Image: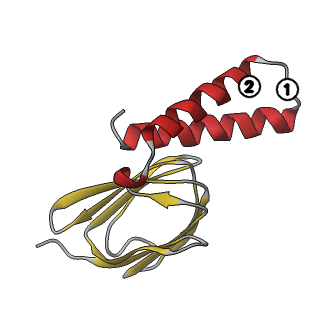
Amino acid sequence: MASTFSLEIVTPERKFFSGEVEMVILKTPEGEMGILRGHMPMVVAVAIGPLKIKVDGEWKEAVLTEGFMEVKQDKTVILTDTAEWPEEIDVNRAKAAKERAEERLHRQLSQIEYYRSQAALARALARLKVTKS
């Protein structure tokens, strides 16, 4: 068995995940990042996107929104606005959110409205990707 490390994922509403894992893959503003036991310590921003967790040789997938990740030699903590397993996602609601965000992006928007619409679209697409819809 591969060496493991402790992973905790916390949202404002709940402790989403806590346990020993072999690997974590998530999206950062700079691109995708993988974490293994013994990774160099760091703090990094988390971007909206899929999360993959390898536990006992099996991959689990979820979706994260913005947050931060602290990596230590034997423990990683992810603090995020939201985290969802595929079965927790309402696919119809995510599709409707995607359509609304795309419509808003086609209009002339203020810069703030444009960034909010981009974030809404990214969240909807990440949710749909994780649910394979």
Residue 7 percent across, percent down from the top left? 38, 75
Residue picked out by circle 2: 104
The residue shown at (57%, 54%) is: 65
User: Position of 73 compared to 123: left or right?
Assistant: left
Q: Residue at x 56, y 31 (%)?
A: 96
Q: Position of residue 110 (x, y in %)?
A: 89, 30
Element at badge 1? loop
- Which part of the image, by quadrant, shows the N terminus? bottom left
Quadrant in the picture for the C terminus:
top left
The kind of secondary structure element at disc 2 is helix
- The earlier-in-sequence mark between 1 and 2 is 2
Residue 55, given in percent of the width and then of the height, sits at: 22, 67
Q: Position of residue 34 (x, y in %)?
A: 38, 57
Above or below, 92 relative to 44:
above
Which three-letter amino acid code belongs to the residue tagged 2? Answer: Arg
Disc 1 residue crowd, few under 14, some 14–19, many 20+, Cα 10 Å = few
User: Relative to residue 43, is residue 63 drawn left or right?
Assistant: left
- Disc 1 + disc 2, Cβ < 8 Å: yes
Q: Is residue 69 left or right of residue 112?
A: left
User: Which circle marks residue 79 in the picture?
Assistant: none
How is the protein colored in the picture? secondary structure
Q: Nearer the viewer, residue 96 or 33?
A: 96
Q: Around disc 2, counting alpha carbons within 10 Å, would you say few (fewer than 14), some (14 to 19), or many (20 or more)?
A: some
38 or 116, which is in the foreground?
A: 116
Residue position for label 1? 109
Q: Which residue: 52% across, 39% down? A: 93
